[in-house]
Image: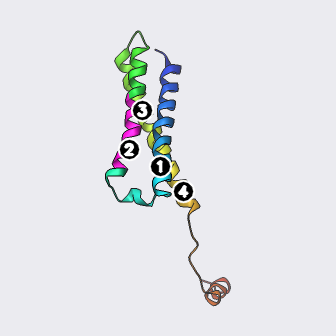
Amino acid sequence: MRPKLVFGVSVLSALLGGGSCIAIVFVVFSSFNPVGRPGLVVFGTLVLPVAATIAGSIFVYRHTARRRRLQAFITAVLATILTFALLVTAIILVRRRNHIEPFQDPILRRYLATSRI
């Protein structure tokens, strides 16, 4: 078994697939707000991570001598998990960056600071 090949190809396919998906969403929508409303464009951007995962699995399958199916399956699962983690991390970071503090009345703020609740 070639763990370096499996892990390396999984990371590379996750970065290519997830990174391209994130880049397209940023360029087309300039935020992650439309991802909550599924549409044809959103589903189209999710094709890239799937294609990268399949390409990585085929690459591992073709470049190993033994246990080809197992290594290709492990590559696909690992790439899927890493891609999902990359997409969730990007959404969390963008949501934090765009967070706007709600307006508070200065009198109410002073009252809340001095009162004992």
Number of the front mark, 1 or 4: 4
Number of the front mark, 2 or 1: 2
Point out which mark residue 46 bears.
Answer: 2
Residue type, numbered disc 4: Val
Number of the front mark, 1 or 3: 3
Q: Residues within 10 Å of mark 1 (few under 14, many from 20)?
A: few
Which region of the structure is painted magenta? 42-54
Contact, CB < 8 Å: mark 1 with mark 3?
no
Residue type, numbered disc 2: Leu
Quarter of the picture holding the C terminus: bottom right
Contact, CB < 8 Å: mark 4 with mark 3?
no
> Does label 4 or label 3 sit earlier along the sequence?
3
Mark 1 sits on what residue? Answer: 88
Residue type, numbered disc 1: Val
CA gap, disc 1 and disc 4 = 10 Å
Contact, CB < 8 Å: mark 2 with mark 4?
no
